[in-house]
Amino acid sequence: MTAIQAPPVAPVGKAAVAALGLLALSTGALESVVTPTLPLLQRELDMSPAEGALLSIVLLVTGALVTPLAGRFGDRYGGKRILVRLMAVVCAGGLVSALAPNLPVLLLGQVLQGAMVGALPLSFVVVRAHLPAGASKVAIGTVGGLFVGGGTVGMLAAGPVAEELSRHWMFALPTIAVIGATLLVNRLMPDDPPGRPDGAGIDWPGLLLLSGTLVTLMLALALAPDLASRPLVLCALVVALAAFVTGWVAVERRAAAPMIDPRMLARPEMWKSCVLTFVICAGTSMAVYLVPQLFDETGDGYGFGAGATEIGFFLLPGAVAASLAGPLGGIGDRRFGSRAVVTTGVVVMAASLLALAAVHTEVWHLVVGKALIALANGLCVTAMMTSTATSVDRSATGVATGLILVTRVLGYAVGGQLGGALLTAKTPSGSDVAAESAYVTGFLIAGAVTASALLVTRTMSKGVRK
């Protein structure tokens, strides 16, 4: 009996890999422009701090929903085909953001841009389909590094572009680069053959219910400062959130191929990973939101009145630290074990957050604190993903990492929105300046939440790989 040969895969040249690298560079730049310019956007669009926090995390929420679908469609129809279509959505989102006259339209643009989170892993799939193992590792490392580098470029360039030209151009310029890079990838990268159908359909009910859960949660957190005076709205949101969560769990437990299987949470290694991921990302998200706001603040004895360009430079050490955290976390995990790496990261992050609550009167206090938080978060996330991926069966790796991804987004959403709600609640009526106590309270809460992770890390296995 003659074995069925897999269709040959066309090799790719350096030009095609360079096009993927350019795409990663431009998407990284587009993804990062909001963070350093968030105070500027809040002023120009008359946003409350809570609305600004929503703007800062909505792209990640979309990415959490798109990523598992992108992987499934890429396996079924071919990585390049889905990659190009996702990037078309990203380009549309960038143009909508560039033309946005108000916050609702800008939020829509950010939702569409969230497709880039699912597009980056697809670029890795495309590379692996066309290159031998050794060359694909180099190419994947190059593409991943260029995405991080693009984030750094976007962070540095967004402020000057927004201040010298306008906020519209800080979205438009990287979007033009994304369009050009997508056209190059479509022209230079050969098609990869689709995989064999696995017989499992797309878990659309689970996706819709999870979307409803995340949207309702963000809405409740965004409206938190005003909910005390509107108890009926609060009750309605709580009931809706409970209904979405209950429906999602019920549907996923019965689905033949669930997007995320909640039954995996019963495994000790999974619920510990989810708890750690949630509290670590919640603490990080509060710092990510509060630090740029404090740079921009003009309070009596606190804040620095920094512009978008200065904020970008102040945040650069944190971006560099985050890019180094991945490799350092992998080395530390291999040598000392995941428990040691996560414990070290939690201690460093909690100490940095508590230190910021006590001392934040000089620029370097915030710069160093933000860099240490970014480094510690990267160490923890790398170790947690490695620990999770190696603690479950190979066939369950995708489901397990998908659950961690959703938990990560929930942590970022809750932390960022709590920070925004805190500033909104402590900003006097008719004023644009939040009380210093809002920042102190936010850093203290973030530090305490992060430190609580130590209760879980004590029960982790050491995870040392010989």
Image: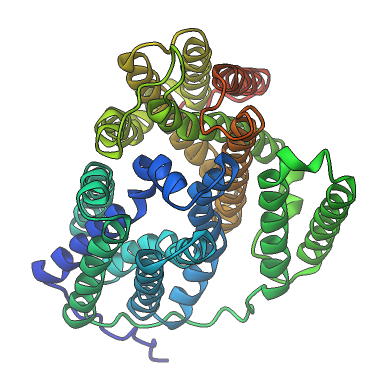
Q: In this view, does 312 lie to the left or right of 104?
A: left
Q: Quadrant of residue 449?
A: top right
- Tell me: 228 left or right of 412: right
If the image is split into quadrants, where does the C terminus sit? top left
In percent of width and height, residue 452 lies at: 66, 20
Frontmost residue, 404 versus 294 = 294
Residue 130: quarter of image: bottom left
Task: Find residue 354 and report its horizontal and vertical position in percent.
Answer: 53, 12
Q: Which residue lies furthest to the top in this view?
A: 358
Left or right of residue 226, residue 8 in this image: left
Residue 273 visible within the image: no
Can residue 353 be seen by looking at this rendering? yes
Relative to 343, residue 74 above or below: below
Taking the spot 54% from the left edge, 57% from the top edge, the residue there is 64
Quadrant where the N terminus is found in the figure = bottom left
Query: Which residue is found at the position 50% from the left and 12% from the top?
Result: 351
Q: In this view, does 452 lie above or below 171?
A: above
Q: Is residue 458 above or below residue 252?
A: above
In this picture, is 76 found above or below 120?
Answer: below
Color scheme of the displayed model: rainbow
